[in-house]
Amino acid sequence: MACRLSLMIVLVAAAVAAVAGHNITEMLASSPEYSLYNDALTRTKLADEINSRTTITVLVLPNAVMSSLLAKNPLPVVKNVLSLLVLLDYYDEKKLHDISKGTTLSTTVYQTTGQPEGNLGFVNITDLRGGKVGFGSAAPGSPLDSTFTKSVKQIPYNISVLEVSAPIIAPGVLSAPAPSAADLNITTLLVKAGCKMFADMLASTGVLKTYQSAAAKGLTLFAPSDDAFKGAGVPDFSKLTSAELVSLLEYHAVAEYKPIGSLKTTSGNITTLATSGAGKYGLTVSSAGDAVTLSTGVDSSRISGTVVDDTPLVIFTVDKILLPVELFAATPAPAPSPSSAPSPSPASASAPAPESASAPASVASPPAPPAGPAEAPAASSPEISSNGTSANASSSPLAHAVPRLVLAGSILSALASLL
Ligand SMILES: *[C@@H]1O[C@H](CO)[C@@H](O)[C@H](O)[C@H]1NC(C)=O
Ligand SMILES: *[C@@H]1O[C@H](CO)[C@@H](O)[C@H](O)[C@H]1NC(C)=O
Ligand SMILES: *[C@@H]1O[C@H](CO)[C@@H](O)[C@H](O)[C@H]1NC(C)=O
Ligand SMILES: *[C@@H]1O[C@H](CO)[C@@H](O)[C@H](O)[C@H]1NC(C)=O
Ligand SMILES: *[C@@H]1O[C@H](CO)[C@@H](O)[C@H](O)[C@H]1NC(C)=O
Ligand SMILES: *[C@@H]1O[C@H](CO)[C@@H](O)[C@H](O)[C@H]1NC(C)=O
Ligand SMILES: *[C@@H]1O[C@H](CO)[C@@H](O)[C@H](O)[C@H]1NC(C)=O
């Protein structure tokens, strides 16, 4: 591996900042009359979105209403409908009845998805005659046909759970269902989002097919923008073997649907499609406010946008190529001497551990800008290198080479057999 970057141990804020103190799944667990709603929150990952926020109101639907919604609509549509029931403000029963002038608009999680036009992601809350409170879409002429039925649970000013009689239907929310994830053309989406170089690499290596077939079961992609390929310190990928290139590209995907709210509630590392064994090709996720950072142990990268979020496929753009420690570690591996190795297994744990202290911070590559306000203090924390992506895990690439090459090879041959 000719391209070696200095190992920059990018430290992660020990406490993930974005997690609020509540767990909606747990709050609803003791109310079996909302079990369908609760299950849908989990499946759509809206539960993570709710848990990552404070000052929030969740309007829940009883099972009878929920079962008809589920029967008539695919999951991405259900997700949109439920997103309209999560208000980004705190309303308990008292506040509902105290609304000034008896009517107000509240924004919802649906508005934050970038899908609705205008104010379609807003909800109208109106104190109706006779003590009833009605909810409806903020779109002009929408009926206020969902009514407050009872208060379920509150953690004052953080989260309120209220039951309503019916979903709030914004115009178009049911009639324009999102295409199924399996039908989305990943190449087209990537090119449109300014990630053409990444898309080209996926196509030329065949990794695109791996992605496309995983998309229906749950897939999260981190696509580096074209600018990321032009940045300073980008290694020369032509020096990688084709198996290594496949691993590099697979490192940019997670075999699970993890929309932004889920990433925000993820602390620590996650496995990628390149992961071939415990601790290999992992990514560490951290967040501060709305900023989500992925650290590889070599470098860190920020999520800069969402290209598509269509349960169970989500594609993000990232501002830097994710460089796994397994391919771009700073410390050169000592050349193994093949003749003197009696063990048939080069991966054996008895391989001498190379000096881990010798990773010098190369002056050639400038340190990454701090990825978020919360990370700055962490960078000075001394206790990090203990585990995960430290120099010592990365300095022995040979130990990981066998499973990785086997995996990459089997993917290549699987691809070859498809062609
Ligand atoms: C929330 O609670 C559920 C059920 O108790 C549990 O499975 C889940 O892991 C919890 N989530 C978090 C983020 O703690
Ligand atoms: C909410 O809807 C009602 C009925 O359409 C309307 O009279 C009221 O002005 C709306 N409230 C707001 C704040 O737009
Ligand atoms: C409300 O949320 C804040 C974090 O935003 C947390 O510090 C506080 O403990 C929470 N309150 C309760 C009662 O859980
Ligand atoms: C995706 O679109 C590209 C052109 O943008 C086309 O060449 C390719 O065949 C399409 N892929 C699929 C799987 O439809
Ligand atoms: C994640 O971190 C834990 C503890 O720090 C470690 O045991 C595990 O091997 C790591 N996994 C990956 C994929 O990096
Ligand atoms: C990793 O480093 C620790 C301390 O720095 C050392 O005790 C351990 O033996 C090293 N492990 C490997 C596999 O190099
Ligand atoms: C690193 O993680 C491994 C696997 O989780 C664990 O066995 C080991 O004790 C950890 N090492 C340190 C120094 O924390």
Image (tube, helix red, strand yellow):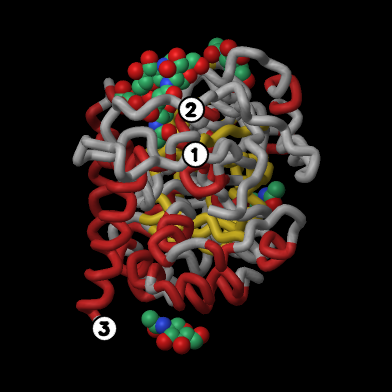
Q: CA distance from mark 2 to mark 3?
A: 42 Å
Determine whether 236 is above or below 380 in the image: below
Q: Position of residue 189 (x, y in %)?
A: 53, 73
Q: Secondary structure at mark 3?
A: loop
In this figure, which residue is indicated by the disc labeled 3?
419
Q: Quadrant of the C terminus?
A: bottom left
Q: Position of residue 152 (x, y in %)?
A: 40, 24
> Do tag 1 and tag 2 residues touch (Cβ < 8 Å)?
yes
Q: Which label belongs to residue 354?
A: 2
Q: Residue furthest front?
A: 339
Side of 211 relative to 54 (left or right): left
Q: Is mark 2 within 8 Å of ligand 6?
A: yes
- The answer, for residue 105, to whether it is visible in the render is yes
Q: Which label belongs to residue 333?
A: 1
Q: Earlier in the sequence, mark 1 or mark 2?
A: 1
Q: In the rendered structure, which amino acid carries the disc numbered 1?
A: Ala
